[in-house]
Image: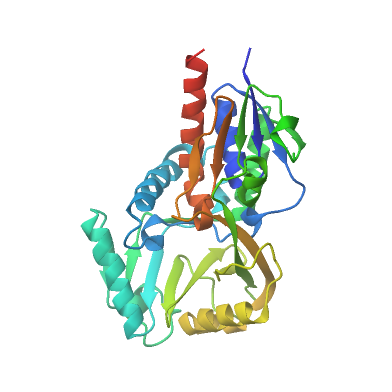
Amino acid sequence: MAPPLSVIGGGVIGLSVARRAALAGWSVTLHASVERGASWVAGGMIAPHSEGWPGEERLLQIGLESLRLWHTDFLDGLPPEVVTARESLVVAVDRADVADLRTVADWLAAQGHPVEPTTAARDVEPLLAQGIRHGFLATTELAVDNRAVVEGLTAHCRELGVQWAPAVDSLDEVDAEQRVIANGIDAPRLWPGLPVRPVKGEVLRLRWRKGCMPVPTRVVRARVHGRPVYLVPRADGVVVGATQYEHGRDTAPVVTGVRDLLDDACAVMPALGEYELAETAAGLRPMTPDGLPVVERLDDRTLVAAGHGRNGFLLAPWTAERITAELEVSVGAK
């Protein structure tokens, strides 16, 4: 008889853990809120190279492990159209941004993961603004439609027999043999002391209109006067993100955040100014003090998979594998 497992959290992390555990033979119940969380407003970048920064060596390592899983079997069971780009171009707008770009490229090379530098970025992506020349290519990175991934994982979980149940406010409401806390910023409510806090970020969706320049075919990331901005292709347009600041649990997009994203996006790719502003939203990333996710066992019945910050989609496969491996250890120990 399959051992019972409860996964608490219906975002990309909870769904990925539930699916992987079901594939491993567990009888899974997913406790999910009806409210849409951070996974619904994410950019969907699978980008350990272009997200990297000196001092984040461990995050780079696990990000690269997870990228490998995206390229191998994580996409199995998901519609092929969830992948919206298969390369990232990171560019600099001014001299200070060029220096930051070189810092990251040199650091990646020192870690044994060199990227492809270019001084002719507009030859790679003609929609870039005139004057943008410096950049580097990360050719193995991906971008996915975050909402299509969530919907695809949900459908696959149902096919595998995962059962749905309401969200819980206490672990006392969960009587499964094993349970996984994977509900993002709400994880500390179930296990006080978990070092996870909400960090707000605005994200915009720009929709292509007839007569506009075409949607870019790769992710474009940039620093504009020190501010990071990313442009992620979708079938009907571009996702632009993302601001990052602490403001409690407020998820209302604010004028300054939206303005900065639009200004920076158009500074990188002026043609986006003709697109439709289709959606403004803000999500709450579950951040930790050191930027690393908390993926571990808490006691003999409880595991946690939370605190993925801006890397939830990137690290979903790695997290699912790590949690499932720990569950298998618990079964073997009995």
Does 77 appear above or below 205? above
Q: Examine the image and state in which quarter residue 237 appears.
A: bottom right
Left or right, 35 with respect to 228, comes to right
Which percent across, then down, holds residue 170? 72, 37
Structure colour scheme: rainbow
Which percent across, then down, holds residue 280? 68, 71
Q: Residue at x 55, y 33 (%)?
A: 303
Q: Residue at x 69, y 70 (%)?
A: 279
Q: Residue at x 24, y 54 (%)?
A: 111
Q: Nearer the viewer, residue 70 or 120?
A: 70
Which percent across, then down, holds residue 256? 62, 82
Left or right, 279 with respect to 328, comes to right
Q: Residue at x 59, y 54 (%)?
A: 146
The answer to whether residue 184 is visible is: yes
Q: Going by the picture, which residue comes out furthest to the front?
A: 193
Which percent across, then down, holds residue 201? 59, 67
Q: Going by the picture, which residue comes out furthest to the bottom?
A: 131
Q: Examine the image and state in which quarter residue 249 appears.
A: bottom right
Does 45 appear above or below 127? above
